[in-house]
Amino acid sequence: MVQTSTLERDAANIHGDEEVDAGDIAVGVIIGRTSEYFDFFVYAIASVIVFPRLVFPEHDALTGTIYSFAIFALAFIARPFGTVIFMAIDRAHGRSAKLTSALVLLGTSTVAIAFLPGYVQIGVASAWLLALARIGQGVALGGTWDGLASLLALNAPARRRGWYAMIPQLGAPLGLIMASALFAFFAANLSSDDFYSWGWRYPFFVAFAINVVALFARLRMVVTPQYQQLFASLTLQPARVGETLRAEWRNVLIGAFTPLASFALFHMVTVFPLSWVFLFTRDGPARFLGIETLGAVACIIAMVVSGAIADRVGRRALLGGSAAAIAIFSGFAPQLLDLGVGGEAIFMVLGFILLGLSFGQSSGALASRLPTRYRYTGSALTSDLAWLFGAGFAPLVALLLAANFGLIAAGAYLLSGAACTLAALWLSRPQGEGE
């Protein structure tokens, strides 16, 4: 039996009599995901426009950005280890203890970056401190899996599963809009010296504050009796990671590769184009961050549409069709980034529409294939591996390919993700046709 923590008992005294319905779960999911993605994009934007200059000023801009992207990838490598650690905390002390400790670590790691001294102050130690904070973020993200998305999907009406699957994904464009707008404001309204001295640090403080709000929003959910009963009735409990992998390794692996097209596209329309425009054009970051914000709005609309389409034709059909469209997109779209503002806008709008359609249905695309005993842990592992394989190295690989072989070569990474998605859908075709 799971031990109840003091924090969980205190929260239960406050919220224990509250009713939980699908709307409450949806709000909790959106708040939680938005806070995570805001953290993600604040770091991603800084890894392009701040860290190469702050941490790697002894290198040219391209080399500094490559080193920055290498540190960026550390969080995705660390995330599965975080899942192992925090699933153990979940089993021993309860879900709210796991969420609290994970979000405290995430907030601490994030706010530590806000105080990061640069190379000028402490030399190469600046890079080591940044890497340590990034690893802390990755470990913490492995513990932020709360099962709310699985709970929402499992309680969705049979004919509305695509719609409910889309809801957790809204956190990505919402987080991007907030992060891009915040950085664009400071970059546009501060002098270069002020921005690189202190302006870039403010979004990291905001990220910490949002994490606090997200923690209380999630705790409000996980301590209610209805929530606990739903988890118990569906046996959505944290199984051991080793046991889950031994029993369900094939489904976890296929589930990790199924969304790779959308996960690869995720960085190809967010982090990579910002790095290309910042490095190889005369434009400042504020204007392009504005374009990203508009693209994220298009992404939200496309995500909402994806729910309606998936409920009509099936999630697998939509994932397969969008993967094929992403493969076509990879063959010509990256070159648009060299065609000025118009080309950049077309690339971003088309890319974000495709991202909304595909990413909107990528969350736990094959989660129903997992037995309920392993669904909670298996879904977390599937998400970790999908981010690692599909997104963790995307900005680094795409920038290296584009810098050495031209923009068209950056599409190769995107094409490989689309091929993996189509292959995974083909391998899983005998089951789950109605998803």
Image (spheres, rainbow, N blue to C red):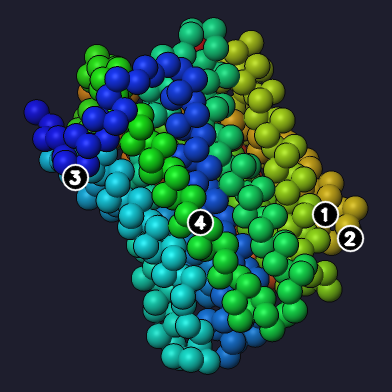
Q: Nearer the viewer, mark 3 or mark 1?
A: 3
- Where does residue 49 sit, x and y in percent of width and height? 65, 71
> In the rendered view, does 307 fall on the left or right side of 74?
right
Instruction: Identify the mark at residue 89; answer none if there is no mark.
Output: 3
Marks 4 & 1, CB-CB < 8 Å contact: no
Residue 136 position (above or below residue 25) = below
Residue type beneath disc 1: Glu
Quadrant assignment, res 233: top left
| Mark 4 vs mark 1, CA separation in Å | 28 Å
Mark 1, Cα crowd under 10 Å, few <14 / some 14-19 / many 20+, is: many
Disc 2, SS: helix
The residues tagged by marks 1 and 2 sit, at their Cα atoms, a distance apart of: 6 Å
Q: Amino acid at mark 3?
A: Ile
Q: Secondary structure at mark 3?
A: helix
* Cα–Cα span, label 3 and label 1: 45 Å
Tell me how far mark 4 sits from mark 2, CA to CA.
32 Å
Residue 219 visible in the snapshot: yes
Report the Cα–Cα distance between label 4 and label 3. Answer: 24 Å
Residue sitting nearer the eye, 217 or 359: 217
Identity of the residue drawn at 72% across and 61% down: 184
Q: Quadrant of residue 129?
A: bottom left
Quadrant of the rendered structure where residue 191 is? Answer: bottom right
Q: Which mark is residue 207?
A: 4
Tag on residue 340? Answer: 2
